[in-house]
Structures are given as structure tokens and as C-alpha cells.
Image (tube, rainbow, N blue to C red):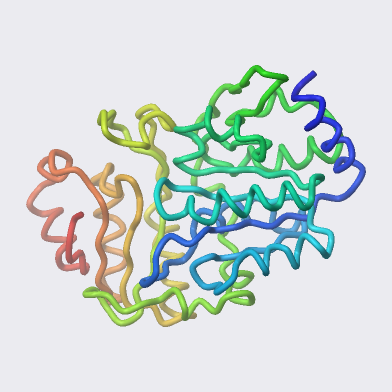
């Protein structure tokens, strides 16, 4: 038996149908809404393979009404990204209500809270699976397994219950970030105009957010990233970052970028290459980094970053 009898009975019921997916981004801020890169990345992993919709709690006055409208129309899987803090205020009651009112629905959680507090989450009674880290390969593999009613034991980055036992499958290696599917910006734009996400900041009037890498090579004791990535880091190449940012500039009028990577500046070579590419665009940007990493950069590299619009290192 892979999971509890009750949950397995539900999965058998679901497995006879095509998976229809709701990806939910619970409210995390009352202002300065940013592109929901987490669920957008998961959406990219199943784009063109499964029917899915996005629900952004930051832009919905009543996200549950939107979620339930999809559940009533036959959507049978609710995937929720959860950071510690504000997102729990919608993630917990909505996931619980979905399971109570629609018992056949499969609840999947991902994000820092789900991964780091997995014992509480998977024992809650209303979360069926946790994606423990990047879901680029885990999520579509899980959907395929649920449809085909096959074992999930070989799927990496997964946490679930086998009876009373909590099962954590091995973590997958971080793949080549350049080979991941493109983020479905236009699909998001049909549901929520990207103009809603390009807000005014001290950087510019239409500031976009972007993730260019996964993980971090350091092991700070206070950091939620460490248990998930174990000092691993993989970044997109400078040309691909530039291509994506150029798209946001040309198509949606972005004039500034916040890089929300755990550590944007790991590779000095990548940073300098990106700086040279983005300099002609005349935009302002900032990223997150460590002072001991930046301290190793050459003066020439720092000057190039400044000339290319790097306003701040957070």
C-alpha cells in the first residue's frame, strides 16, 4: 500500500479521469503584487499536457469562490504554493474546505512551509502530497501516476503517507535551468493582465519580478532554503535571462526588475555577462546576494554592474 486506504480509494476514483488542475497562489501581500513565479513555473511543467488554471489570491477579492467554481466544473486537483506567514491564512482553510466539500479532490502543497514543516502538513488530513523542492519534473510525473494508477514511490521530491508512515522520496538533482519550459506569461496574461504585476517601486514605474536560479550553495543555519537544496545551486544562462527580461520590456513595458533568487550573484561570470547584455536596455534592477560573495567580485565587475543599472544588492 502506498498511502492510506481512505486516500487510496479517492485516488482510484480520480485515476479513472483526466486530471484537471487548479494552481493556487494564496495571498502574500496587500500591495506590490508580483508575478506569481512559483505557480507559473509549475504551470510551465504541464503546459500543453494537462488542462490547468491559475488562481492568484493577491488579485482575487474572494479566491475561494473562484476555486470552487472550478471544482464544481470538474477540476479535480488543487495545487497550492505555501510560504510561511500570510499565505497560510488562505492555504489552510481553502485546502481543508476543498477536501471536505469535494472528497475526491487531490490536494498537493509545495513551497518552503510545506517542505520544512512536512510532518504537520502531511498529517493534517487534508493534504495528499507535498512536492519537496522544485516541481518541474515531480509535478507532471505525479499527475501521470495518478491518472495511470501506478506507484508514486519512484518519483523524486515527493512526500506522502503510507498508512501512518510518512514517506520522503530521494531528492532529485537540480537540472539544467535553460532546458526548462518557457514560463507561460501569455497564459497568465489572459487570466490576470500582467500590468497588474508591474508595480511602481523606487526602481521604476513598472517593476517586474523574476527568478533566474534555484537554491543556494551556502548552509546558513537560519535559512529555509538549506533543507530543501542542501547547498545546491543552478542558474539560467545570462542570454536566457536577458531574453526573458527583454520580452517583459518589449511586450509589457517593464522598466525595472527585482531578481528574487535566493542568491542571484553566485556566479560572477554570469552576472557580468548579463550586465553587458542588459546595459543597452537602460533599466534598473536589484538582486539578493551575500556580502562575502560580492566582496570577491573584481572592481571591474562591480563597475559593469553599476553601469548596467544594478541599483542595489539586497
Q: Residue visible at 60% across and 35% down?
A: 124
Task: Tell me if 165 is positioned left or right of 221 in this view.
Answer: right
> Seen in the image, is 165 located left or right of residue 84?
right
Q: Image height check: is 79 above or below 115?
A: below
Where is residue 202? Give x, y as percent: 21, 75
Q: Is residue 38 above or below residue 158?
A: below
| Residue at the image point whose x is 35% and y is 29% from the top | 231
Quadrant where the N terminus lies?
A: top right
Identify which residue is drawn at 11% across, 60% down.
303
Q: Quadrant of residue 279?
A: bottom left
Foreground of the two, 103 or 298: 103
Q: Quadrant of residue 197?
A: bottom left
Percent of width and height locating residue 64: 64, 64
From the viewer's side, name the closer residue of 307 and 71: 71
Q: Which quarter of the rendered picture does the C terminus lie within?
A: bottom left
* Location of residue 129 with respect to 288 vertically, above or below: above
Outermost residue toward the right in this view: 16
Q: Residue furthest left?
A: 299
In the displayed structure, does residue 182 sit left or right of residue 220?
right
Name the residue nearer the viewer: 297 or 220. Answer: 220
The percent coordinates of residue 187 (x first, y second) are: 64, 70
* Numbered-mark total: 0
Residue appearing at x 36%, y 31% in the figure: 226
Amino acid at each position: 500500500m502506498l498511502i492510506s486506504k481512505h486516500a487510496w480509494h479517492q485516488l482510484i476514483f480520480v485515476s479513472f479521469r483526466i486530471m484537471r488542475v487548479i494552481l493556487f497562489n494564496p495571498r502574500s501581500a496587500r500591495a506590490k503584487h508580483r508575478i506569481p513565479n512559483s505557480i507559473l513555473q509549475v504551470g510551465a511543467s504541464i503546459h500543453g499536457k494537462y488542462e490547468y488554471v491559475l488562481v492568484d489570491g493577491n488579485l482575487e477579492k474572494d479566491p475561494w469562490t473562484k476555486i470552487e467554481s472550478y471544482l464544481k466544473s470538474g477540476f479535480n486537483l488543487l495545487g497550492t504554493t505555501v510560504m510561511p506567514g500570510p499565505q497560510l491564512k488562505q492555504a489552510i482553510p481553502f485546502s481543508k474546505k476543498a477536501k471536505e466539500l469535494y472528497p475526491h479532490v487531490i490536494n498537493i502543497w509545495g513551497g518552503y512551509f510545506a517542505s520544512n514543516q512536512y510532518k504537520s502538513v502531511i498529517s493534517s488530513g487534508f493534504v495528499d502530497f507535498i512536492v519537496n523542492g522544485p516541481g518541474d519534473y515531480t509535478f507532471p510525473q505525479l499527475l501521470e501516476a495518478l491518472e495511470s494508477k501506478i506507484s508514486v514511490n519512484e518519483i523524486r521530491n515527493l512526500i506522502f503517507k503510507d498508512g501512518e508512515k510518512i514517506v520522503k522520496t530521494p531528492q532529485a538533482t537540480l537540472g539544467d535551468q535553460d532546458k526548462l519550459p518557457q514560463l507561460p506569461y501569455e497564459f497568465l496574461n489572459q487570466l490576470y493582465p500582467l500590468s497588474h504585476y508591474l508595480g511602481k517601486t523606487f526602481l521604476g514605474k513598472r517593476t517586474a519580478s523574476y527568478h533566474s536560479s534555484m537554491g543556494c550553495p551556502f548552509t546558513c543555519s537560519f535559512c529555509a532554503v538549506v533543507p530543501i537544496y542542501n547547498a545546491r545551486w543552478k542558474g539560467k544562462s545570462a542570454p536566457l535571462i536577458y531574453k526573458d527580461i527583454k520580452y517583459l520590456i518589449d511586450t509589457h513595458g517593464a522598466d525595472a526588475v527585482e531578481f528574487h533568487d535566493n542568491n542571484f550573484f553566485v556566479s560572477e561570470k554570469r552576472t557580468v555577462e548579463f550586465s553587458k547584455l542588459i546595459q543597452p536596455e537602460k533599466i534598473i534592477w536589484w538582486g539578493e546576494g551575500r556580502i562575502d560573495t560580492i566582496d570577491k567580485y573584481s572592481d571591474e565587475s562591480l563597475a559593469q554592474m553599476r553601469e548596467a543599472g544594478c541599483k542595489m544588492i539586497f
